[in-house]
Amino acid sequence: MGAINCKETPRQKMIGMMYLFLTAMLALNVSKDILDAFVIVNEGMEKTNTNFSLKNSFTYDAFVVANQNDPIKVAPYYRAAMNIKKYSKDLDTYIKKLKAELITRIEGTEKAPAAIKDMRNFDGKDDRDVPHNFMLGESEDGSQGSARELKNKLIEFKKNLFAELKKSDISLPNKELSIRGLGDLGINTENNPKASADEPAEKYWETALFAEIPAAATITLLSQIQNQVKNAEATVIQTLLGGIGATDF
């Protein structure tokens, strides 16, 4: 078995396209209908994240069973899978905290819990100033806000996942080629070198994503990044699971 690259489902593609469409519409209009549509897209993202978590839990269960049946052979793969599980959980928790802190800054401590639980209760969906300052600070490149820390954590996450696959006690068919085929694991953290000099915000990953968008869009984008993290987790643990069978040949 070769590396398994988890492709987007039709549902994921549809939700992603809706997000891009709504983001484009923001440049023309920030009506209540547009903001409410972001709430619906965010709900779809969160449902997808829940489904990914369930799917990944089944894969981890398969590692547990395989390790019980043949611990000597499976132990390296099991350890790698458990490490990946922790990396993903830690990053997912961090992003959840970002969303909660942003909502709290806008809504205040009394109203925030209801808005965190259900974005339909979020009165400050149209706020642009707080999300911009929270994610980017006052820097042109976003280095003074939470977006830079998020970017660094995403880069570290990808680095850690690839490190698990590259360990000497992990065997994969055409290992180097298989790992290279995973690309960036569906998590793009690169700046845009082709950005126009007239649009400096488009140059940097942080500002291209988070500059001057309303809170509803910021929360939805963070949910999408959680989706990418769980998808990357699924890709790598399925690749590892496939490697266990490959050692029989």
Image: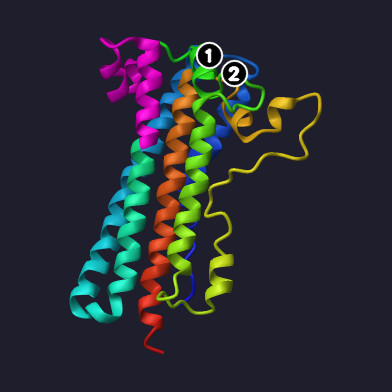
**Horizontally, is 59 left or right of 235 in the view?**
left
Residue at left offset 41%, top offset 20%? 102
**Horizontally, is 180 left or right of 247 in the view?**
right
Pinpoint residue 245: horizontal percent, then vertical percent: 36, 80
Whether 124 is among the magenta residues is: no
Dominant SS of magenta comes to helix
What quarter of the picture does the N terminus occupy? bottom left
**Element type at marker 2?**
loop
Q: Which mark is residue 205?
A: none
How crowded pointer 1 is (Cα within 10 Å; few <14, some 14-19, many 20+) is rated as: some
In this rendering, the answer to whether 166 lies above or below 129 is below
Return the residue found at the far left. Answer: 68
Residue 200: name its quadrant: top right
Is residue 11 visible to the viewer in this orientation of the structure?
no
Between the C-alphas of marks 2 and 1, the distance is 6 Å
How crowded pointer 2 is (Cα within 10 Å; few <14, some 14-19, many 20+) is rated as: many
Which residue is under mark 1? 128
Pinpoint residue 25: horizontal percent, then vertical percent: 61, 22
**Horizontally, is 59 left or right of 174 in the view?**
left
Callout 2–callout 1 Cβ contact below 8 Å: yes
- Which residues are the magenta region? 94-123
Pinpoint residue 112: horizontal percent, then vertical percent: 30, 15
Is residue 106 visible to the viewer in this orientation of the structure?
yes
In this rendering, the answer to whether 208 lies above or below 154 is above
Which amino acid type corresponds to the residue marked 2 in the rendered image?
A: Glu
Whether 116 is among the magenta residues is: yes
**Element type at marker 1?**
loop
Which amino acid type corresponds to the residue marked 1 in the rendered image?
A: Arg
What quarter of the picture does the C terminus occupy? bottom left
Which residue is under mark 2? 212
